[in-house]
Image (tube, grey):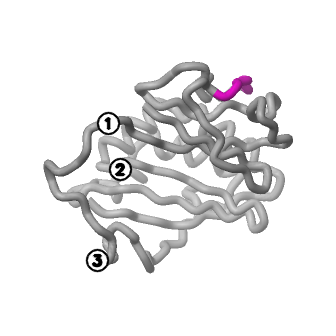
Amino acid sequence: MFRHAFKMQLRPGCEEEYKRRHDALWPEMLRQLHGAGISDYSIFLDRETLTLFAVQKRTDDNTAADLPNTEAVKRWWAYMQDIMECNSDHSPVEKPLDEMFHMDQCGRCPQPKEGNRRPGPRFFGVLWPCHSFSAAGPCPAEPAGMACGKNSGGMAARTPKTATATLPPKGRTVGSSKNLLVVSYRC
């Protein structure tokens, strides 16, 4: 398995529409991506430049090169072409990125020995966009963060529509910066 990263360009004023469309990604697109050996696929937006940065894991025997020939992908590209820079076939203009560093493979990071992992609670973090951070939790005008599969207590699931939430009892505020609320959860 390896990581594949690339960048794309969003058209001005289309940030929320891009997010809305991906929040409602078609099930057939998900099946196509998984079937092609793609997983752990994330897309990030640089709001200053409107550059989209995508990273995905691909199996060594992936068939990602065949995706442009599928009907689902062709329909998705046609659906997205009005909000992104695209080629004549409606595919997004993609520019590959070279990996310059990967912490887990740098050779200097301690790796846990197999069978030597401590049992116990897992921790994860959530970033919530927030206009006004307060001890009561994130701004109610923003959608809630994603919940851990083992802890649904008090946190609304992310949906394409806005939802409100308060901090779950098990969550603890770690910090906030530039309108982001960082919360740590124990599962």
Q: Nearer the viewer, residue 176 or 131?
A: 176
- Residue at point 33%, 71% (across, down): 109
Q: Which residues are magenta?
A: 162-167
Q: Earlier in the sequence, mark 3 or mark 1?
A: 3
Residue denoted by label 1: 120
Q: Closer to the camera: disc 3 or disc 2? A: 3
Q: Nearer the viewer, residue 171 or 127?
A: 171
Residue 135: where, in percent of width, then height? Answer: 77, 35
Q: Report whether residue 87 is seen.
A: no
- Residue at point 81%, 37% (across, down): 134
Residue 120: where, in percent of width, then height? Answer: 32, 36
Q: Closer to the camera: disc 3 or disc 1? A: 1
Magenta span has 163? yes
Q: CA distance from mark 3 to mark 2?
A: 26 Å
Tell me if 19 is positioned left or right of 111 in this view.
Answer: right
Q: Do the residues bearing badges 3 and 2 touch, measured as CB atoms within 8 Å? A: no
Q: Nearer the viewer, residue 134 or 43?
A: 134
Magenta span has 59? no
Q: Amino acid at mark 1?
A: Gly
Residue denoted by label 2: 38
Residue denoted by label 3: 107
Residue 88: where, in percent of width, then height? Answer: 60, 62
Q: Secondary structure at mark 2?
A: strand
Q: Earlier in the sequence, mark 3 or mark 2?
A: 2
Q: Secondary structure at mark 1?
A: loop
